[in-house]
Image (spheres, rainbow, N blue to C red):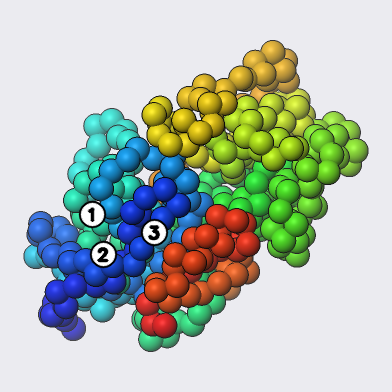
Amino acid sequence: MVFTNLTLPATMRALLLTGLYNVTVQDVAVPQLVSPTDAIVKLTTAGICGSDLYAYRGFASDQDPYVLGHEGIGYVVQTGSGVSSVSVGDYVVIPDNFHHGQLEMQPTFPISYGGGVQSPGVLGLQAEYAIVKAADANLFRLPIHRNETNETLEQSYLMTGDIFSTGWTAITWSGFEPGDSVAVFGAGPVGLMATYSALLRGASRVYTVDHVRERLDVAESIGAIPINFAESDPVTQIQKLEPAGVKRAVDCVGLEALNSTLAFEPSIIVRQMVNVTGFEGGLGQVGVHAYTPGTQAALDHPQLSADITFPATSFWTKSLRLQAGIVQPYRIAPQLINLISSGVANTSFITTAVINIEDAPEYYERFNRTEEVKVLISFSR
Protein backbone atom coordinates (compact mmCIF):
# COMPACT_ATOMS: atom_id res chain seq x y z
CA MET A 1 0.00 0.00 0.00
CA VAL A 2 1.34 3.43 -0.95
CA PHE A 3 0.71 6.30 1.44
CA THR A 4 0.80 9.89 0.25
CA ASN A 5 2.65 12.65 2.03
CA LEU A 6 0.73 14.21 4.89
CA THR A 7 -0.05 17.91 5.10
CA LEU A 8 1.98 19.50 7.88
CA PRO A 9 1.40 22.60 10.01
CA ALA A 10 3.43 25.74 9.34
CA THR A 11 5.04 25.88 12.78
CA MET A 12 6.06 23.53 15.56
CA ARG A 13 7.24 23.71 19.15
CA ALA A 14 10.98 23.28 19.53
CA LEU A 15 13.64 23.69 22.21
CA LEU A 16 16.38 26.20 21.42
CA LEU A 17 19.69 26.91 23.08
CA THR A 18 19.53 30.68 23.58
CA GLY A 19 22.52 31.28 25.84
CA LEU A 20 24.71 29.93 28.61
CA TYR A 21 22.57 27.63 30.81
CA ASN A 22 19.53 28.92 28.97
CA VAL A 23 17.07 27.01 26.78
CA THR A 24 13.63 28.18 25.66
CA VAL A 25 10.66 26.60 23.94
CA GLN A 26 9.63 28.52 20.84
CA ASP A 27 7.53 28.25 17.70
CA VAL A 28 9.72 27.63 14.66
CA ALA A 29 8.97 26.73 11.06
CA VAL A 30 8.31 23.07 10.33
CA PRO A 31 11.10 21.78 8.04
CA GLN A 32 10.23 21.13 4.42
CA LEU A 33 11.53 18.63 1.89
CA VAL A 34 14.45 20.12 -0.02
CA SER A 35 15.98 17.17 -1.85
CA PRO A 36 14.31 14.10 -3.40
CA THR A 37 16.25 11.98 -0.89
CA ASP A 38 14.86 13.82 2.17
CA ALA A 39 12.18 12.62 4.59
CA ILE A 40 10.21 14.41 7.29
CA VAL A 41 9.60 12.58 10.58
CA LYS A 42 6.96 13.43 13.19
CA LEU A 43 8.75 12.90 16.50
CA THR A 44 6.94 10.96 19.22
CA THR A 45 9.81 10.99 21.73
CA ALA A 46 13.13 12.82 21.93
CA GLY A 47 15.94 12.44 24.44
CA ILE A 48 18.05 14.94 26.32
CA CYS A 49 21.67 13.79 26.13
CA GLY A 50 24.74 14.56 28.19
CA SER A 51 26.34 16.04 25.09
CA ASP A 52 23.43 18.52 24.90
CA LEU A 53 24.67 19.73 28.29
CA TYR A 54 28.08 20.21 26.71
CA ALA A 55 26.68 23.12 24.70
CA TYR A 56 24.37 24.21 27.53
CA ARG A 57 27.39 24.62 29.82
CA GLY A 58 29.28 26.77 27.34
CA PHE A 59 31.69 24.28 25.75
CA ALA A 60 30.44 25.08 22.24
CA SER A 61 31.22 28.25 20.30
CA ASP A 62 28.80 31.18 20.53
CA GLN A 63 26.20 31.33 17.77
CA ASP A 64 22.62 32.35 17.12
CA PRO A 65 19.91 30.34 18.93
CA TYR A 66 19.38 26.87 17.46
CA VAL A 67 17.29 23.76 18.04
CA LEU A 68 18.96 21.21 20.29
CA GLY A 69 18.82 17.44 20.33
CA HIS A 70 20.05 14.39 18.45
CA GLU A 71 17.98 11.53 19.89
CA GLY A 72 14.61 10.94 18.26
CA ILE A 73 11.99 8.35 17.36
CA GLY A 74 8.75 8.82 15.45
CA TYR A 75 7.04 8.09 12.16
CA VAL A 76 7.56 9.23 8.60
CA VAL A 77 5.06 11.84 7.38
CA GLN A 78 6.66 12.92 4.10
CA THR A 79 9.24 11.47 1.71
CA GLY A 80 10.98 12.84 -1.34
CA SER A 81 10.59 11.10 -4.69
CA GLY A 82 14.03 9.50 -4.36
CA VAL A 83 13.40 7.74 -1.03
CA SER A 84 12.85 4.00 -1.40
CA SER A 85 13.63 2.28 1.92
CA VAL A 86 10.97 3.98 4.09
CA SER A 87 7.40 5.07 3.45
CA VAL A 88 4.90 7.43 5.03
CA GLY A 89 3.68 5.84 8.26
CA ASP A 90 6.84 3.83 8.98
CA TYR A 91 7.97 3.81 12.63
CA VAL A 92 11.62 4.88 12.67
CA VAL A 93 14.61 5.82 14.81
CA ILE A 94 16.81 8.73 13.75
CA PRO A 95 20.53 8.14 14.48
CA ASP A 96 22.33 10.98 16.25
CA ASN A 97 24.75 11.58 13.39
CA PHE A 98 24.08 10.99 9.75
CA HIS A 99 25.72 9.58 6.68
CA HIS A 100 25.77 11.65 3.50
CA GLY A 101 24.28 8.71 1.63
CA GLN A 102 26.99 8.52 -1.03
CA LEU A 103 29.88 6.17 -1.71
CA GLU A 104 32.77 6.99 0.62
CA MET A 105 36.25 6.93 -0.88
CA GLN A 106 37.63 7.78 2.56
CA PRO A 107 36.07 8.21 6.03
CA THR A 108 34.48 11.58 6.75
CA PHE A 109 33.79 13.41 9.99
CA PRO A 110 30.24 12.57 11.12
CA ILE A 111 27.71 15.41 11.32
CA SER A 112 25.27 15.33 14.23
CA TYR A 113 21.81 16.78 14.66
CA GLY A 114 21.43 19.68 17.08
CA GLY A 115 24.82 21.29 16.56
CA GLY A 116 23.70 24.61 15.11
CA VAL A 117 26.21 25.79 12.51
CA GLN A 118 27.97 22.43 12.84
CA SER A 119 24.79 20.69 11.59
CA PRO A 120 24.19 22.32 8.19
CA GLY A 121 20.79 21.74 6.64
CA VAL A 122 19.12 20.11 9.65
CA LEU A 123 17.52 21.15 12.92
CA GLY A 124 17.93 19.40 16.24
CA LEU A 125 15.53 16.65 17.28
CA GLN A 126 14.02 18.26 20.39
CA ALA A 127 11.15 19.43 18.22
CA GLU A 128 7.88 18.11 16.86
CA TYR A 129 9.24 17.46 13.35
CA ALA A 130 12.65 16.71 11.86
CA ILE A 131 14.11 16.64 8.38
CA VAL A 132 16.30 13.63 7.63
CA LYS A 133 18.78 14.03 4.78
CA ALA A 134 19.66 10.95 2.70
CA ALA A 135 16.77 9.17 4.40
CA ASP A 136 17.55 5.76 2.89
CA ALA A 137 20.86 5.76 4.75
CA ASN A 138 19.77 7.54 7.91
CA LEU A 139 16.53 6.06 9.18
CA PHE A 140 16.22 2.78 11.06
CA ARG A 141 12.85 1.29 10.19
CA LEU A 142 11.47 -0.56 13.21
CA PRO A 143 9.92 -4.02 12.93
CA ILE A 144 6.58 -2.98 14.45
CA HIS A 145 3.93 -0.39 13.60
CA ARG A 146 3.81 2.67 15.82
CA ASN A 147 0.33 1.62 17.01
CA GLU A 148 1.84 -1.62 18.34
CA THR A 149 4.48 -0.01 20.51
CA ASN A 150 4.44 0.79 24.23
CA GLU A 151 6.41 3.13 26.47
CA THR A 152 9.08 0.55 27.31
CA LEU A 153 9.69 -0.40 23.68
CA GLU A 154 9.66 3.21 22.49
CA GLN A 155 12.25 4.22 25.07
CA SER A 156 14.48 1.24 24.30
CA TYR A 157 14.29 1.74 20.54
CA LEU A 158 15.02 5.46 20.94
CA MET A 159 18.28 4.72 22.72
CA THR A 160 19.66 2.71 19.80
CA GLY A 161 20.06 6.00 17.93
CA ASP A 162 22.74 7.18 20.35
CA ILE A 163 23.44 6.10 23.90
CA PHE A 164 22.86 2.34 23.60
CA SER A 165 24.96 2.25 20.43
CA THR A 166 27.61 4.42 22.09
CA GLY A 167 27.81 2.36 25.27
CA TRP A 168 27.88 -0.90 23.28
CA THR A 169 30.63 0.43 21.02
CA ALA A 170 32.72 1.59 23.99
CA ILE A 171 32.79 -2.02 25.17
CA THR A 172 33.60 -3.27 21.67
CA TRP A 173 36.44 -0.78 21.27
CA SER A 174 38.01 -2.02 24.50
CA GLY A 175 38.47 -5.42 22.84
CA PHE A 176 35.90 -7.07 25.08
CA GLU A 177 35.33 -10.82 25.06
CA PRO A 178 32.78 -12.77 27.14
CA GLY A 179 34.13 -13.48 30.60
CA ASP A 180 36.21 -10.29 30.79
CA SER A 181 36.08 -7.98 33.79
CA VAL A 182 35.33 -4.35 32.97
CA ALA A 183 35.69 -0.94 34.62
CA VAL A 184 33.27 1.69 33.32
CA PHE A 185 34.17 5.27 34.20
CA GLY A 186 31.01 7.36 34.34
CA ALA A 187 27.47 6.38 35.33
CA GLY A 188 25.61 8.89 33.21
CA PRO A 189 23.35 7.56 30.45
CA VAL A 190 26.24 6.41 28.23
CA GLY A 191 28.15 4.89 31.14
CA LEU A 192 25.06 2.99 32.26
CA MET A 193 24.55 1.75 28.70
CA ALA A 194 28.18 0.60 28.61
CA THR A 195 27.66 -1.15 31.95
CA TYR A 196 24.49 -2.81 30.66
CA SER A 197 26.14 -3.78 27.38
CA ALA A 198 29.07 -5.45 29.14
CA LEU A 199 26.74 -7.43 31.41
CA LEU A 200 24.48 -8.38 28.49
CA ARG A 201 27.51 -9.63 26.56
CA GLY A 202 28.77 -11.86 29.36
CA ALA A 203 31.19 -9.84 31.47
CA SER A 204 32.35 -11.66 34.59
CA ARG A 205 32.25 -8.47 36.66
CA VAL A 206 31.56 -4.83 35.86
CA TYR A 207 32.74 -1.98 38.09
CA THR A 208 30.94 1.32 37.48
CA VAL A 209 32.76 4.44 38.71
CA ASP A 210 31.00 7.71 39.55
CA HIS A 211 30.26 9.98 42.52
CA VAL A 212 26.48 10.42 42.15
CA ARG A 213 24.86 7.95 44.53
CA GLU A 214 21.59 7.68 42.59
CA ARG A 215 23.41 6.78 39.38
CA LEU A 216 25.58 4.22 41.15
CA ASP A 217 22.39 2.72 42.58
CA VAL A 218 21.07 2.23 39.04
CA ALA A 219 24.32 0.51 38.04
CA GLU A 220 24.11 -1.76 41.08
CA SER A 221 20.47 -2.58 40.32
CA ILE A 222 21.47 -4.19 37.00
CA GLY A 223 24.35 -6.19 38.47
CA ALA A 224 27.38 -3.88 38.49
CA ILE A 225 29.68 -3.21 41.43
CA PRO A 226 29.42 0.52 42.30
CA ILE A 227 32.65 2.44 42.92
CA ASN A 228 32.40 5.97 44.39
CA PHE A 229 35.56 7.86 43.43
CA ALA A 230 34.74 10.71 45.83
CA GLU A 231 35.12 8.35 48.80
CA SER A 232 38.53 6.89 47.92
CA ASP A 233 40.78 6.15 44.94
CA PRO A 234 38.73 4.06 42.48
CA VAL A 235 41.78 2.17 41.22
CA THR A 236 42.59 1.00 44.75
CA GLN A 237 38.96 0.04 45.36
CA ILE A 238 38.84 -2.08 42.20
CA GLN A 239 42.28 -3.64 42.69
CA LYS A 240 41.22 -4.94 46.10
CA LEU A 241 38.78 -7.13 44.19
CA GLU A 242 40.88 -7.52 41.01
CA PRO A 243 44.54 -7.81 42.11
CA ALA A 244 45.71 -8.36 38.51
CA GLY A 245 43.54 -5.53 37.22
CA VAL A 246 40.48 -5.63 35.02
CA LYS A 247 40.74 -6.81 31.44
CA ARG A 248 38.89 -3.83 29.93
CA ALA A 249 38.20 -0.22 30.87
CA VAL A 250 36.08 2.43 29.17
CA ASP A 251 35.81 6.22 29.48
CA CYS A 252 32.23 7.48 29.22
CA VAL A 253 32.97 10.94 30.67
CA GLY A 254 35.51 12.75 28.49
CA LEU A 255 36.85 16.26 28.90
CA GLU A 256 34.68 17.04 31.94
CA ALA A 257 36.31 14.35 34.10
CA LEU A 258 36.38 15.17 37.82
CA ASN A 259 38.85 14.29 40.56
CA SER A 260 37.97 13.33 44.15
CA THR A 261 37.35 16.98 45.08
CA LEU A 262 34.91 17.23 42.13
CA ALA A 263 37.18 19.65 40.28
CA PHE A 264 37.89 19.30 36.56
CA GLU A 265 40.93 17.13 35.81
CA PRO A 266 40.70 16.01 32.17
CA SER A 267 43.60 13.53 32.34
CA ILE A 268 42.46 11.66 35.42
CA ILE A 269 40.29 8.99 33.80
CA VAL A 270 42.82 7.93 31.17
CA ARG A 271 45.41 7.58 33.95
CA GLN A 272 42.99 5.56 36.06
CA MET A 273 42.06 3.34 33.11
CA VAL A 274 45.71 2.55 32.41
CA ASN A 275 46.41 1.95 36.10
CA VAL A 276 43.45 -0.36 36.68
CA THR A 277 43.77 -2.44 33.49
CA GLY A 278 45.91 -5.57 33.52
CA PHE A 279 48.52 -6.84 31.07
CA GLU A 280 47.40 -6.96 27.41
CA GLY A 281 44.06 -5.39 28.28
CA GLY A 282 42.14 -2.84 26.28
CA LEU A 283 40.63 0.61 26.65
CA GLY A 284 37.65 2.22 24.91
CA GLN A 285 37.03 5.95 25.00
CA VAL A 286 33.70 7.48 23.93
CA GLY A 287 33.39 10.40 26.36
CA VAL A 288 33.39 13.74 24.53
CA HIS A 289 36.91 15.20 24.27
CA ALA A 290 36.04 18.14 21.99
CA TYR A 291 37.76 21.32 23.18
CA THR A 292 37.05 24.70 21.58
CA PRO A 293 39.36 27.56 22.65
CA GLY A 294 37.69 30.82 23.56
CA THR A 295 34.36 29.37 24.65
CA GLN A 296 32.86 30.46 27.95
CA ALA A 297 33.69 27.11 29.53
CA ALA A 298 37.30 27.32 28.34
CA LEU A 299 37.62 30.82 29.80
CA ASP A 300 36.01 29.80 33.10
CA HIS A 301 38.11 26.63 33.46
CA PRO A 302 41.69 27.26 32.29
CA GLN A 303 42.73 23.78 33.42
CA LEU A 304 40.80 22.39 30.44
CA SER A 305 42.78 21.85 27.27
CA ALA A 306 42.78 20.08 23.93
CA ASP A 307 45.68 18.01 25.30
CA ILE A 308 45.78 15.59 28.21
CA THR A 309 48.68 13.95 30.03
CA PHE A 310 48.98 10.34 28.92
CA PRO A 311 50.81 7.64 30.97
CA ALA A 312 52.73 6.31 27.98
CA THR A 313 55.25 4.23 29.94
CA SER A 314 52.61 2.24 31.82
CA PHE A 315 50.51 1.91 28.69
CA TRP A 316 53.49 0.54 26.75
CA THR A 317 54.76 -1.70 29.55
CA LYS A 318 51.36 -3.34 29.95
CA SER A 319 50.95 -3.83 26.17
CA LEU A 320 47.56 -2.13 26.27
CA ARG A 321 45.37 -1.11 23.34
CA LEU A 322 43.13 1.95 22.99
CA GLN A 323 40.40 2.93 20.57
CA ALA A 324 38.58 6.25 20.86
CA GLY A 325 36.30 8.48 18.85
CA ILE A 326 32.80 9.44 17.78
CA VAL A 327 30.41 6.50 17.54
CA GLN A 328 28.32 6.18 14.38
CA PRO A 329 25.12 4.35 15.38
CA TYR A 330 24.12 3.32 11.85
CA ARG A 331 26.87 0.68 12.06
CA ILE A 332 25.48 -1.09 15.14
CA ALA A 333 21.89 0.08 15.82
CA PRO A 334 20.17 -2.51 13.58
CA GLN A 335 21.68 -5.30 15.70
CA LEU A 336 20.56 -3.59 18.91
CA ILE A 337 17.05 -3.11 17.52
CA ASN A 338 16.93 -6.89 16.96
CA LEU A 339 17.98 -7.50 20.58
CA ILE A 340 15.15 -5.27 21.77
CA SER A 341 12.58 -6.78 19.40
CA SER A 342 13.48 -10.30 20.55
CA GLY A 343 13.12 -9.36 24.22
CA VAL A 344 16.82 -9.78 25.02
CA ALA A 345 17.50 -6.09 25.72
CA ASN A 346 15.47 -3.44 27.55
CA THR A 347 17.18 -0.12 28.22
CA SER A 348 14.22 1.80 29.63
CA PHE A 349 15.52 1.29 33.18
CA ILE A 350 17.62 4.47 32.97
CA THR A 351 14.65 6.76 32.24
CA THR A 352 13.84 8.91 35.27
CA ALA A 353 11.52 11.50 33.71
CA VAL A 354 9.20 11.68 30.70
CA ILE A 355 8.06 15.26 30.15
CA ASN A 356 6.17 17.65 27.91
CA ILE A 357 8.43 19.89 25.83
CA GLU A 358 7.12 22.95 27.69
CA ASP A 359 8.81 21.60 30.84
CA ALA A 360 12.18 21.05 29.15
CA PRO A 361 13.94 24.18 30.52
CA GLU A 362 13.28 23.00 34.09
CA TYR A 363 14.52 19.50 33.31
CA TYR A 364 17.68 20.76 31.64
CA GLU A 365 18.44 22.38 34.99
CA ARG A 366 17.65 19.17 36.85
CA PHE A 367 19.75 17.06 34.47
CA ASN A 368 22.62 19.52 34.75
CA ARG A 369 22.50 19.13 38.56
CA THR A 370 22.54 15.29 38.13
CA GLU A 371 19.07 15.08 39.67
CA GLU A 372 17.92 13.01 36.68
CA VAL A 373 19.60 10.10 34.91
CA LYS A 374 17.73 10.20 31.60
CA VAL A 375 15.06 12.70 30.56
CA LEU A 376 12.78 12.05 27.59
CA ILE A 377 10.46 14.53 25.88
CA SER A 378 7.15 13.00 24.82
CA PHE A 379 5.25 14.80 22.08
CA SER A 380 2.01 13.04 23.04
CA ARG A 381 1.89 14.76 26.43
Residue 43 horizontal side relative to residue 187, left or right = left
Q: Amino acid at mark 2?
A: Ala
Residue visible at 65% across and 15% down in the picture: 312
Residue 348 horizontal side relative to residue 111, left or right = right
Say which quarter of the image contains residue 148. bottom left
Where 173 falls versus 316 (above or below)?
below
Task: Please tell me the numbered disc located at residue 23.
Answer: 3
Residue visible at 50% across and 39% down in the picture: 288
Task: Please tell me the numbered disc located at residue 122.
Answer: 1
Q: Nearer the viewer, residue 20 or 277?
A: 20
Residue 296 in the image, given as x and y percentages of width and height: 43, 36
Q: Where, quadrant-wise, is the N terminus in this rendering? A: bottom left
Q: Amino acid at mark 3?
A: Val
Total marks placed: 3
Badge 3 or badge 1: first in the primary sequence: 3
Q: CA distance from mark 3 to mark 1?
A: 19 Å
Frontmost of labels 3 and 1 is 3
Q: Which residue is mark 2?
A: 130
Task: Name the element at disc 3.
Answer: strand
Q: Nearer the viewer, residue 262 or 311?
A: 262
Residue visible at 28% across and 54% down in the picture: 66
Q: Where, quadrant-wise, is the C terminus in this rendering? A: bottom left
